[in-house]
């Protein structure tokens, strides 16, 4: 097989603030192949979104990428000059955001925004062609009567419809990689289901690779092929979705899974991971999770390395839960 | 859900007009009778200013039409050529009504053109500062702070003392005094809008910075700017009148309302009130009507006051 669509190696992104250096992404590695969906899971502040922005080359100062490589179709895009990066953005790389109320410009009509997105990368395309392409893409994501809808303003759409428009805009130039930053978090469950279905179908059909950033494990379970669990800027566990969710080996993954409300017996207090995510400004040495971890021991004060307890699984822990994992 | 007819032109049922932002804005604006009155008066004043040469009984700056014998006539008096001085005449025999019509033309012209120029400069500076951030923003905004820390009239006086008289010099002085207000307003709004996801989304589409700045950021910063611009036009007119009154504003050859007021000043105590009074009223009505419109614009365009 040729290169994976995206290969991230030891990515480090840090924010140099007055209060200190925040290592938001600290040595993250993963890869996504053509037509595959990677779920990037973690709590707020675990570095998921910064990972996404790093790939897009949109880390704003005082943040910057300190190290590592991002190979997009075999080409390192870290430190690529801005004009080249801009040519990739929106054409080969696309991003979908969390809040559909905010991602469309409120004062421009849908057609204006979509035609602009096409023409930014294909100036030779006529307005009529760009409009036709916008219309087709809107139809593709399940928007009824796209011709009418093109002439609407964003406020005339419901949340779910807006997110479809945002997804359609991302799809316009048939990107090879889409980074979706919690795109269904703000939507209700039925809409979420529909959108997940459409997205999965599109990834299969077009061979677009997808990184789905979320904190919702049920979304990952139904959508992704692979999953990366992030904690305090590091990947703590990585593997195929079924393996990781059925047999978590990292105590944090297990804690996350146990915190899903439906996994708790009715009437009992809901289970949670004790404590809070540590501040990235004052990250304790060693394993960042050890203060909340019931399996922690003295050795956890030194930083754990990635281990491969079973084939296809990568874990950053001294005490992985291996009892339940089938050999 | 209603099915959408394929032929848009053939409408079987009365369809409610599509609510465009523009229509909603117009409906909101028309809710206040006071603002509507202000707008009507303002339009009337602008109309008069535009067609002044055609509706004035006299061209007050054509010496052939003036007669020194008609000087200082009270309102309602008849002139030698036979027409009536409805608002009286000044010491040169100039019809005050015609003088006001011509004066409005100059006052409005100077006020609006300086406001537009100041808007263009302030908008660019403010938008750029907010978009660029960091040291560029710090520098530009300190310049704005320094500019705003001087009283407007003082800056204008000094500038005119240095530059000398002339219409364009007055406009330049007004622009210098006013651009900083726009810059500060735009920067404030743009800072908020800049953080919104649609800007990030536009960048993710690979649009150029210039395009994102002017096409995506700017239109979303316009509402407060429109309000500031309206009020600043009124300020510019008032400031220009002040400068002209003080005798360092517009040259005698292009007499604005301020100059007309100044002309009659010396006659005020001798009972010939009309030479200063009527231009003063015209100035007052103009500024009040602009401010009424501006107030309503602020109410309509302020999202926090929206019902």
Image (spheres, grey):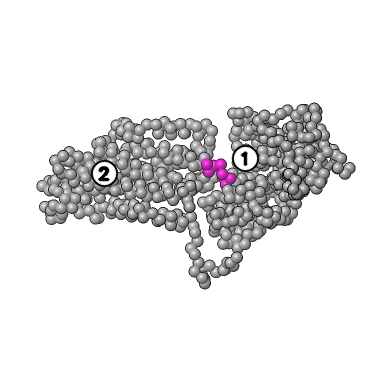
Q: Is B20 left or right of B104, judged from the image as shown?
A: right
Q: Is A81 left or right of A26, judged from the image as shown?
A: left
Q: Residue A301, image x and y in percent? A: 77, 28
Part of the protein shown in magenta: B192-199
Q: Residue at x 37, y 36 (%)?
A: B177
Q: Is residue B193 magenta?
A: yes
Q: Residue at x 18, y 44 (%)?
A: B273
Q: Quadrant of residue A275?
A: top right
> Is there any visible trace of residue A19 in the rendered image?
yes
Q: Residue at x 74, y 34 (%)?
A: A292
Circle 2 is placed at which residue position?
B256
Q: Residue at x 45, y 40 (%)?
A: B185
Q: Looking at the rendering, in which quadrant would you find the C terminus of chain A?
A: top right
Q: Tell me which chain the residue with mark 2 is part of.
A: B
Label 1 vs label 2: CA separation? 54 Å
Q: Residue B161, image x and y in percent? A: 29, 31
Q: Tell me which chain the residue with mark 1 is part of.
A: A
Crowd tier of the residue under label 1, counting other residues whose Cα lies within 10 Å: few below 14, some 14–19, many 20 or above:
some
Relative to B94, does residue A128 appear above or below in the rendering? Answer: below
> Is there any visible trace of residue A228 in the rendered image?
no
Q: Is residue A10 magenta?
A: no
B100, B253: nearer the viewer: B100
Q: Secondary structure at mark 1?
A: loop
Relative to B275, does residue A138 appear above or below in the rendering? Answer: below
Q: Residue B228, image x and y in percent? A: 41, 44
The dominant secondary structure in magenta is helix
Circle 1 is placed at which residue position?
A58
């Amino acid at each position: 097989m040729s290169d994976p669509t995206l290969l991230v190696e030891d990515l480090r992104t840090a924010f140099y603030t007055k209060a200190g250096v925040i290592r938001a992404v600290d040595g993250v590695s993963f890869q996504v192949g053509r037509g595959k969906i990677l779920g990037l899971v973690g709590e707020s502040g675990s570095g998921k979104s910064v990972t996404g922005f790093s790939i897009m080359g949109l880390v704003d100062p005082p943040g910057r990428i300190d190290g590592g490589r991002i190979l997009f179709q075999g080409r390192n895009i870290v430190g690529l000059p801005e004009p080249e990066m801009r040519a990739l953005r929106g054409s080969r790389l696309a991003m979908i955001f969390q809040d559909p109320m905010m991602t469309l410009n409120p004062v421009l009509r849908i057609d204006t925004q979509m035609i602009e997105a096409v023409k930014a990368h294909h100036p030779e395309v006529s307005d009529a062609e760009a409009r036709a392409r916008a219309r087709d893409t809107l139809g593709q994501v399940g928007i009824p009567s796209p011709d009418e809808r093109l002439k609407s303003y964003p406020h005339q759409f419901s949340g779910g419809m807006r997110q479809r428009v945002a997804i359609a805009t991302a799809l316009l130039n048939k990107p090879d990689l889409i980074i979706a930053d919690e795109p269904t978090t703000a939507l209700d469950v039925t809409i979420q289901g529909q959108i997940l279905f459409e997205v999965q179908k599109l990834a299969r059909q077009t061979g677009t690779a997808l990184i789905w950033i979320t904190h919702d494990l049920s979304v990952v379970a139904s959508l992704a092929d692979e999953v990366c669990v992030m904690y305090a800027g590091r990947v703590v566990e990585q593997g195929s979705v079924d393996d990781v969710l059925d047999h978590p080996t990292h105590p944090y993954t297990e804690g996350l899974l146990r915190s899903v409300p439906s996994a708790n017996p009715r009437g009992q207090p809901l289970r949670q991971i004790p404590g809070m995510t540590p501040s990235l400004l004052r990250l304790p040495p060693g394993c960042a999770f050890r203060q909340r971890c019931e399996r922690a021991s003295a050795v956890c004060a030194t930083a754990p390395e990635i281990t491969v307890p079973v084939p296809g699984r990568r874990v950053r822990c001294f005490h992985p839960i291996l009892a339940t994992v089938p050999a | 859900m209603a099915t959408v007819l394929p032929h848009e032109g053939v409408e079987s049922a009365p369809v409610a007009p599509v609510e465009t932002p523009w229509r909603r804005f117009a409906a909101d604006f028309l809710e206040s009778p006071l603002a509507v009155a202000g707008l009507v008066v303002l339009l009337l004043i602008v109309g008069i200013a535009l067609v002044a040469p055609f509706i004035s009984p006299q061209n007050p700056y054509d010496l052939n039409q003036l007669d020194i014998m008609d000087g200082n006539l009270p309102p309602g008096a008849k002139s030698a050529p036979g027409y009536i001085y409805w608002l009286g005449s000044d010491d040169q025999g100039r019809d005050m009504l015609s003088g006001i019509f011509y004066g409005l033309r100059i006052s409005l012209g100077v006020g609006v053109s300086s406001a537009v120029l100041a808007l263009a400069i302030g908008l660019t500076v403010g938008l750029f500062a907010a978009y660029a951030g960091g040291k560029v923003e710090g520098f530009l905004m300190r310049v704005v702070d320094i500019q705003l820390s001087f009283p407007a009239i003082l800056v204008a006086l000094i500038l005119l003392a240095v530059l000398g008289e002339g219409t364009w010099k007055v406009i330049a002085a007004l622009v210098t005094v006013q651009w900083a207000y726009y810059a500060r307003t735009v920067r404030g709004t743009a800072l908020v809008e800049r953080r919104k996801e649609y800007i990030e989304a536009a960048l993710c589409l690979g649009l150029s910075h210039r395009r994102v700045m002017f096409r995506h950021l700017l239109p979303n910063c316009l509402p407060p700017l429109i309000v500031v611009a309206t009020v600043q036009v009124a300020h510019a007119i008032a400031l220009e009148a002040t400068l002209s009154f003080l005798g360092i504003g517009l040259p005698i050859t292009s007499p604005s309302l301020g100059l007309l007021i100044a002309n009659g000043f010396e006659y005020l105590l001798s009972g010939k009130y009309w030479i200063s009074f009527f231009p003063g009223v015209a100035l007052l009505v103009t500024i009040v009507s602009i401010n009424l419109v501006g107030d309503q614009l602020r109410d309509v365009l302020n999202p926090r006051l929206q019902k």
